[in-house]
Every structure is written in structure tokens, then in C-alpha cells.
Image (cartoon, grey):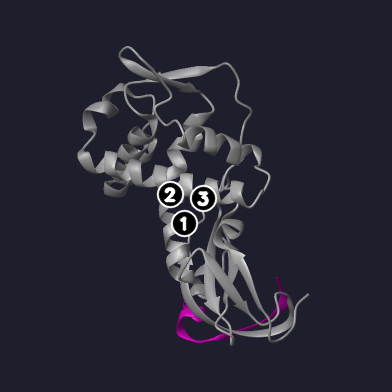
């Protein structure tokens, strides 16, 4: 039930949802030279320095020689962050999707199977581990924008009609098919409203210029 005066609380975890499709874990495994999440943090750092490093693979043996203390610190922060998110889901008795189940299994054992001169993981964890630093910083960006993990919605949770919106910022969701930019606004009740726009939209530059220069009015169904 909703009303114009009700405050409805939702979790940022519900908003974020799954980022990539999960594959079934099979018997195929991969051996790497160090903790898989630490290696992922190495690639993330190098990509921030130069986008050409996005071609790097977690299977490359030279990555372990590029590890710096900050990579291990970031990996530990990411581990704690997602462990907490998975714990909240379990406490709320929310059924885990296949992706979240894989995430929970990985985040609770990022060392994988520690063997002599290496670490062994299911091959299906490579894509998940590669994206986790991006997911982590996206989570922090969204949580910071909303001011916390749990958010009160002012007014009705579903609105059909016109809304006057003021631009806040853009975010990149890093989903499986990363072809949208999220444009975030506030409405007259100071609720956050997100409009996804495809990156290939030929009018995206004009749209961005317009929303950054003045408020806009959108007629649609919001939920």
C-alpha cells in the first residue's frame, strides 16, 4: 500500500541486483599464481592508468609480479563489502540467484584451492572476479549518492504522469552488456530517479548537455 505521505524503505542491494549472468560451475578449472581477486585489483589499477590494459587476462603469469600492497588492501575491502551484502541477503531470507550464489562462494573463499605454486579456481569465476572491483566502486558511488544502504522513498512508490527532475550525475552500471549510461536526477520530493540511456543513442550528447544546463520534465510511469 502506498500513499502520498508514506515513507517506503528499500535496500540499495535490491536496486543494484545482478550485474552479469552467471554460468553453471563445471569441472573446468584454472590455475593462477596468486589470489584471483588480488590479480583482478592489479588489472583494475592498470586499466585506470591506461585503458589499453583492459586487454590483460587474469591468466597472465606476469600479473603476480605487478602486485603492490594497495592491490591486496583493495581486495580485502572488496571481500568484506560483498560478504556483508551477502549476509544481509541471507538474514532477509532472500533467495540467491545463480550469480549471487557464485559470488557468495567466491567471496567466502577468494584463495580458491591453494596448491603448490598456485591457486586453483573454477574457470567460471574469471569473469566474476574481473568485474568485482568495478562493482565495488559502483556500489560505493550509489550508496554515497543515496546516503546509505537503506533509503526512505518520500511519497508514492509508483508515479504515472509528469515529474520535474534536476540532474545529479551519471553512473556506469558495469552489467554484462555495458551499453547504457545511468542519468540520475532528484524529483520534487528529493527522491532519486534514474533514466538509462543507451551509449549508442545518437542524441546522447545533446541530451546530456540539456539536462546539465536546466531542469527537465518527464512524462512517464516511474516505479
User: What residue is at 49 percent from the left and 33 percent from the top?
Assistant: 106
- Can I make out residue 199 in this image? no
Q: Earlier in the sequence, mark 2 or mark 1?
A: 2
Residue 212 image position (x, y, % from top left): 46, 80
Mark 2 Cα-neighbour bin, 10 Å: few <14, some 14–19, many ≥20: some
Closer to us: 209 or 188: 188
Mark 3 Cα-neighbour bin, 10 Å: few <14, some 14–19, many ≥20: some
Mark 1 Cα-neighbour bin, 10 Å: few <14, some 14–19, many ≥20: some
* CB under 8 Å between discs 1 and 3: yes
Q: Is residue 114 above or below residue 69?
A: above
* CB under 8 Å between discs 2 and 3: yes
Quote the CA–CA distance across marks 1 and 3.
Answer: 10 Å
Q: Quadrant of residue 40?
A: top left
The N terminus is located in which quarter? bottom right
Closer to us: 111 or 19: 111
Can you tell which mark lies on residue 81?
Answer: 2
Q: Is residue 40 left or right of residue 160?
A: left
* CB under 8 Å between discs 2 and 1: yes
- Mark 3 — residue? 85
Q: Quick one: SS at disc 1?
A: helix
Does residue 78 show up magenta in the picture? no
Residue 173 image position (x, y, % from top left): 52, 55
- Residue range corresponding to the magenta coloring: 209-223
Q: Is residue 68 left or right of residue 147?
A: left
- Mark 1 — residue? 139
User: What residue is at 47 percent from the left and 63 percent from the top?
Assistant: 142
Quote the CA–CA distance across marks 2 and 3.
Answer: 6 Å
Residue 46 image position (x, y, % from top left): 28, 42
Amino acid at each position: 500500500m502506498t500513499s502520498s505521505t508514506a515513507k517506503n524503505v528499500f535496500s540499495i542491494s535490491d536496486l543494484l541486483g545482478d550485474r552479469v549472468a552467471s554460468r553453471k560451475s563445471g569441472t573446468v578449472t584454472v590455475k593462477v599464481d596468486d589470489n584471483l581477486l588480488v590479480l583482478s585489483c592489479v588489472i583494475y589499477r592498470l586499466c585506470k592508468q591506461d585503458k589499453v590494459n583492459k586487454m590483460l587476462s587474469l591468466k597472465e603469469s606476469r600479473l603476480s609480479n605487478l602486485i603492490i600492497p594497495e592491490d591486496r588492501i583493495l581486495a580485502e575491502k572488496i571481500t568484506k563489502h560483498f560478504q556483508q551484502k551477502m549476509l544481509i541477503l541471507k538474514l532477509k531470507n532472500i533467495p540467491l540467484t545463480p550469480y549471487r550464489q557464485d559470488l557468495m562462494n567466491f567471496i567466502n573463499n577468494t584463495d580458491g584451492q591453494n596448491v603448490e605454486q598456485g591457486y586453483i579456481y573454477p574457470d567460471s569465476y574469471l569473469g566474476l572476479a574481473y568485474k568485482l572491483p568495478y562493482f565495488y566502486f559502483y556500489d560505493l558511488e550509489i550508496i554515497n549518492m543515496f546516503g546509505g544502504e537503506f533509503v526512505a522513498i518520500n511519497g508514492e512508490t509508483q508515479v504515472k504522469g509528469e515529474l520535474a527532475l534536476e540532474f545529479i550525475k551519471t553512473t556506469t552500471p558495469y552489467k554484462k552488456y555495458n551499453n547504457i549510461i545511468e542519468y540520475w536526477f532528484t524529483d520534487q520530493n528529493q527522491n532519486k530517479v534514474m533514466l538509462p540511456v543507451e551509449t549508442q543513442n545518437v542524441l546522447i550528447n545533446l541530451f546530456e548537455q540539456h539536462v546539465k544546463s536546466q531542469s527537465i520534465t518527464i512524462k512517464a510511469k516511474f516505479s
